[in-house]
């Protein structure tokens, strides 16, 4: 066990794209001894780089979770092992998923309403945060519960080659929809068509999205699963079919713009089309996670879900790896493993 607690401290609020220099790497003594009642201490094993963390780096006001104060350790979703416990529900040794922080050891209040659950038996740490973690669960409930897809309909997914988007798109195929993915670059689009079995793709970096969607969806889009927002959401709004559903999962295009994301123009289009637009949080479905994991496991075993994990190692790389979400350099679920291999796959 390390006697040092490495920490990444938020030193400056990023302006635009996040930079590694916005963070400072510190070494402090590892915490020891007991924790108070209603608290656990975990040793982090792997971190998920979640785009919404960029919102937590901003000043207070535009985020579901609190803004991280300057000089404090950066918050982050993680899996870890309980090393000291003041809550009998999470005894020492329990493997948990929670909103932790970029440090080796983190204290987590168990009754504060933060996401916190023990990893299901049979899932390794990496599976619990990756293949069957937050992003695939989000895709599952966002598409099936919010999107209400029906076989034969047309589904369009933005951010389609990413962790959440690629799962949503492939669940759409499994459910018998015609699926079109929007992604940046020829390689990501080819992966979506060749490996994920999508019917068509739009490379938003090289093609006019609204015109391409109009050509590919002559009868309109029935379900739009949106990870991006901005002009891509606008292009979809302008191409929705009557009684279509827009699933607002994320707005990554605006996370580093330093202002609140704008909504689509011409909301009359939604009224005339009787279109439903709904946001959601994965956490709304916490009591149904087992159902999603069961289905995702079965589809994976049947070879029906292609999955890409962009796994990095080394605590010191956290900010640099996180930044790749915004350049599009990440190739799938972006994880940073900080424990040794045997434990991470345990
Ligand atoms: N509602 C919820 O509970 C919930 C839970 C989890 C995630 N989310 C949201 O789901 C979305 C995807 O998250 P993820 O973790 O799966 O990340 P991801 O899609 O694996 O990675 C992010 C991708 O976003 C694309 N991107 C970045 N900047 C962009 C821009 N300006 N315009 C268009 N595309 C851009 C890039 O792909 P390209 O190379 O294709 O540009 C990048 O690879 C995010 O918006 C996130 O906030 C929501």
Image (cartoon, grey):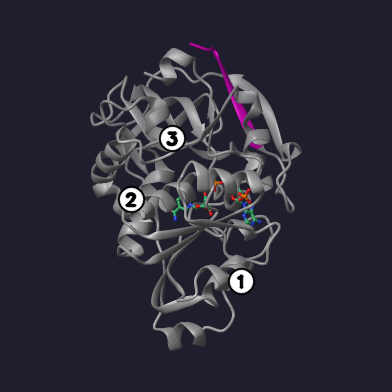
**Closer-to-camera residue (323/27):** 323
For residue 49, above or below residue 67: above
Residue with the mark numbered 2: 174
Residue with the mark numbered 3: 130
For residue 133, above or below residue 214: above
Q: Which of marks 3 and 1 is in front?
A: 1
Residue 129: image quadrant is top left
Q: Which residue is depicted at the point 62% across and 72% down?
A: 211
SS type, badge 3: loop
Mark 2 crowd level (few <14, some 14–19, many ≥20, 10 Å Cα): some
Residue 7 is a magenta residue: yes
Residue 45 is a magenta residue: no
Taking 59 as reference, is 221 left or right?
A: left
Of pointers 2 and 1, the one earlier in the residue sequence: 2
The span picked out in magenta is: 1-9
- Residue 210 circle label: 1
Taking 239 as reference, is 54 left or right?
A: right
x, y percent for residue 346: 36, 18
Residue 232: image quadrant is bottom right
Of pointers 3 and 2, the one earlier in the residue sequence: 3
Of pointers 3 and 1, the one earlier in the residue sequence: 3
x, y percent for residue 183: 59, 53
């Amino acid at each position: 066990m390390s006697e040092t607690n490495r920490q990444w401290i938020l030193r400056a609020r990023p302006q635009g794209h996040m930079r590694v220099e916005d963070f400072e790497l510190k070494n402090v003594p590892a915490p020891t001894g007991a924790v108070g009642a209603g608290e656990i201490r975990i040793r982090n094993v792997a971190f998920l780089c979640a785009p919404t963390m960029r919102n937590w780096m901003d000043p207070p006001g535009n985020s579901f979770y609190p803004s991280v104060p300057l000089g404090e350790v950066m918050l982050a979703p993680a899996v870890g092992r309980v090393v000291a416990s003041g809550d009998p529900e999470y005894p020492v040794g329990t493997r948990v998923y929670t909103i932790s922080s970029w440090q080796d050891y983190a204290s987590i209040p168990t009754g504060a309403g933060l996401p916190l659950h023990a990893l299901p038996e049979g899932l390794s740490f990496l599976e619990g945060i990756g293949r069957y973690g937050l992003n695939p669960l989000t895709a599952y409930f966002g598409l099936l519960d919010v999107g209400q897809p029906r076989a034969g309909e047309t589904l369009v997914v933005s951010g389609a080659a990413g962790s959440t988007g690629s799962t949503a798109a492939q669940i759409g195929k499994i459910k018998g929809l015609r699926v079109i993915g929007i992604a940046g670059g020829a390689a990501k689009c080819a992966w979506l068509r060749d490996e994920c079995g999508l019917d068509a793709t739009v490379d938003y970096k090289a093609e006019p999205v609204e015109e391409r969607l109009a050509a590919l969806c002559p009868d309109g889009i029935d379900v739009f699963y949106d990870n991006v927002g901005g002009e891509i959401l606008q292009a979809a709004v302008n191409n929705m079919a009557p009684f279509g559903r827009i699933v607002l999962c994320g707005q990554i295009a605006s996370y580093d713009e330093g202002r609140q994301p704008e909504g689509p123009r011409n909301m009359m289009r939604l009224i005339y089309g009787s279109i439903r637009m709904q946001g959601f949080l994965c956490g709304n479905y916490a009591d149904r996670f087992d159902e999603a994991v069961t289905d995702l496991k079965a589809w994976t075993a049947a070879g029906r879900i292609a999955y890409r994990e962009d796994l990095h190692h080394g605590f010191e790389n956290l900010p640099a790896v996180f930044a790749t979400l915004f350049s599009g350099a990440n190739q799938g679920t972006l994880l940073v493993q900080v424990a040794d291999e045997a434990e991470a796959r345990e």
